[in-house]
Image (cartoon, helix red, strand yellow):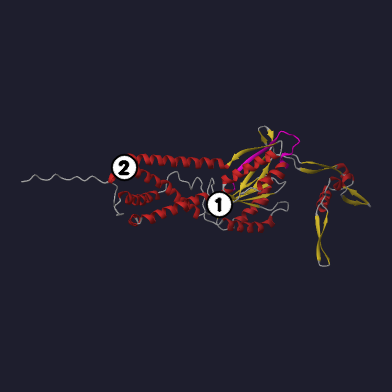
Amino acid sequence: MQRIAVQRPVMTLVVFLVILVLGVLSLLNLPIDLMPNVSLPTASVVTLYPGASAEDVEKKVTDPLEEAISTVPNVEEITSTSFENVSSIVVSFAWGTDLDAAVNDLRDRLDFARRQLPEDAEDPYIFKFDLSQWPVLVVAATSDDPTLDVRKIVEDQVVEELRHGKGVGAVQIWGGGRKRMVHIWVDKARLEALHLPLETLVAALAQENVNLPVGNLAVGKTDYLVRVPQAFRSARELEDLPLVNLQGRLVRLKEVARVEDGYAEPTNFVRVNGKPGVFFAIQKTSGANTVEVAREARKRLEAVEERIPGLNLQVVIDGSLFIRNSIHNLTTTILWALVLVVLVTLVFLRNLRGSLIIASVIPFSLITAFIFLYLIHASINIISSPPWPSPSAWWWTTLWWSWRTSITTGNGGKPGARPPSLAPARWRAPSPPPR
């Protein structure tokens, strides 16, 4: 290989230039992320059972689900935790298992076990653990104006603006704001006077507050879908809800209860620098560049903050900050490596041209690594970015040095040629004296 590189310097130069161009193009198109795109072979099953104690959740929800999950192939470990109202089961599969296929098998087993769960229990939710779904940005929204509904503004305007950004997958909101809720305060004495059980009131609310499809209506060549809207639109409509017919008299809800249109009681609070606020996390799509998504999201947040007076947006967690610092440290390390290589080779070889040639191999070996990363659809992260050149640098050093020495010596490209400064000194014995 070295003989061919030395005998054909033009071809060698072209090969190096092609690799250089491909490496630069690969570097520009590689996504930058904190961790590689690795899916852990773990899934979580969460089931809600409102109003149940931890013991009831374990016996009626967790145990039947564990029996069904244990029949899924490639399951290595099952860990369950039962709380009040919630059952959480973590399923660990064997490494190398196709997580998508495993989750499909898990979903089939859960659908079969759903018949054994109580009627009040909700359907199980399955969550996959994916490192790429960590939030890119976590932002806090506050306002000095007490009349401003921060959560509603975030839901209606901020989130809508962020979703149009490149690479933004989802925006999750928690804390703050007030949720509208209709309260029904039942008069126990009135119910007992009318001999009405509370279940009658609950059943009437469940039956009436629905929209029912009743079929199709064909008019000529047009087919219309017909439905009966019965969902309540105001508290006044709810007050006139008929409950029961007692001896020809229709008893309505307002006779036994008081209907109040208000807000739900807050169960959690979010404080930002001592002020009530809202948190929202920005997640990127799979394969998106974390640094680019964070930069684009910051620009859109600044535009929204300028457009809405009184709204303050503050970035609490920036996932791209550590990535930018890591890339900066890597660049600084490479530059110091180049300087040290040039100094060391210059001291020992005492040849500036040879020192520069050897130093040029370090970035070139990294560029070839970028081509490999691009071909395998990888990303630049803290694992795939080594702090030092790859071992292939020595091979490129030998090849590059052989080709350069053939030019500097000017001997027609013969193999094994060396520049005059590197030629070993030959010791010759003195000639014997003449007889």
User: Can you identify the residue that label 1 sits on?
Assistant: 39
Q: In the rendered structure, does residue 141 fall within the stretch colored magenta?
A: yes
**Front residue of 326 and 176:** 326
Residue furthest to the left in view is 435
Of badges 1 and 2, the one in the foreground is 2
Residue furthest to the right in view is 248
Q: Residue at x 62, y 53 (%)?
A: 66
**Figure quadrant of residue 12:** bottom left
Q: Residues within 10 Å of mark 1 (few under 14, many from 20)?
A: few
Which amino acid is tagged 1? Ser
Position of the N terminus by quadrant: bottom left
Q: Earlier in the sequence, mark 1 or mark 2?
A: 1
- Percent x, y of residue 220: 83, 67
Q: CA–CA distance between discs 1 and 2?
A: 49 Å
Residue 266 visible, this angle = no
Q: Which stretch did the figure color magenta?
A: 133-152
**Front residue of 257 and 217:** 217
**Figure quadrant of residue 300:** top right
Relative horizontal placement of residue 428, taking residue 87 as reference (left or right): left
Residue 157 visible, this angle = yes
User: Can you identify the residue that label 2 sits on?
Assistant: 349
**Front residue of 44 and 20:** 20
Query: Which numbered marker is on residue 303?
Result: none
Determine the secondary structure under disc 1. Answer: strand
Q: In the rendered structure, does residue 348 fall within the stretch colored magenta?
A: no
- Percent x, y of residue 287: 57, 51
